[in-house]
Amino acid sequence: MDLRSLQASPRPGLVNLVVEIPAGSRNKYEFNQEAGVMALDRVLHSSVRYPFDYGFIPNTLAEDGAPLDAMVIMHEPTFAGCLIQARPIGILDMLDEGAHDGKLLCVPAADPNQRGINSIRQIAPVQLEEVAEFFRTYKSMEGRVVDILGWLDADAVPALIEACSAAAQQS
């Protein structure tokens, strides 16, 4: 799977998101760039499961040295390697081992039931806390220190995507 031709953002307000981990999974898959396939990285050794489909925005480079992380709210899980055009509605702002590690929260552009969702303010606070708690718990079980700084709304997304796209072009 060659992702070099995929733009991070095909048009304003949308991103290309490649799913690595379907919602409900304890398996942590990561895209292996050299082989062009999804690879099993590890199995989470806690009882938590990914709350949403989780993956990355191709052709970006976040501060942690990996592509920008992203989650997409789906009514049914997809599969590892699935490409979704999605609308980012916010960012989970966090530090992982002291390094900034923001994660986009998105809704799929192809889902008419979510067409009107444009902000994390439209997502139940308990659902947002569930996502934050997932990262706190699974990283803690791996002995990593994570600091959840909070949620940023959709207006913070374009600057992050632009910075991560520029970083990828410079690498």
Image: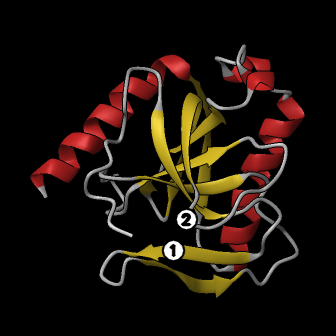
Image location of residue 80, percent across then percent down: 62, 67
Image location of residue 22, percent across then percent down: 72, 62
**Between marks 2 and 1, how big is the CA–CA gap?**
10 Å
In this view, the residue farthest toward the left is 170
**81 or 90: nearer the eye?**
81
Residue 103 lies, with reference to residue 109, above or below; the image says: below
Mark 1, residue position? 30
Image location of residue 117, percent across then percent down: 71, 18
Q: Which amino acid does label 2 sit on?
A: Gly
Q: What residue type is labelled 1?
A: Glu
Label placed on residue 81: 2
* Left or right, 144 with reference to 32: right
In this view, the residue farthest toward the top is 116
Quadrant of res 35? bottom left
Mark in the foreground, 2 or 1: 2
Point 59% across, 73% down: residue: 144
Point 88% across, 75% down: residue: 47
Image location of residue 151, percent across then percent down: 63, 32
Assess disc 2: are there few (<14), some (14-19) or many (≥20) residues with their C-alpha within 10 Å of its C-alpha.
some
Q: Specify the color scheme.
A: secondary structure
Of helix, strand and loop, which one carries label 1? strand
- Does label 2 or label 1 sit earlier along the sequence? 1
Point 36% across, 32% down: residue: 10
Quadrant of res 99? bottom left
Residue 114 lies, with reference to residue 71, above or below; the image says: above
Assess disc 1: are there few (<14), some (14-19) or many (≥20) residues with their C-alpha within 10 Å of its C-alpha.
some
Of helix, strand and loop, which one carries label 2? loop
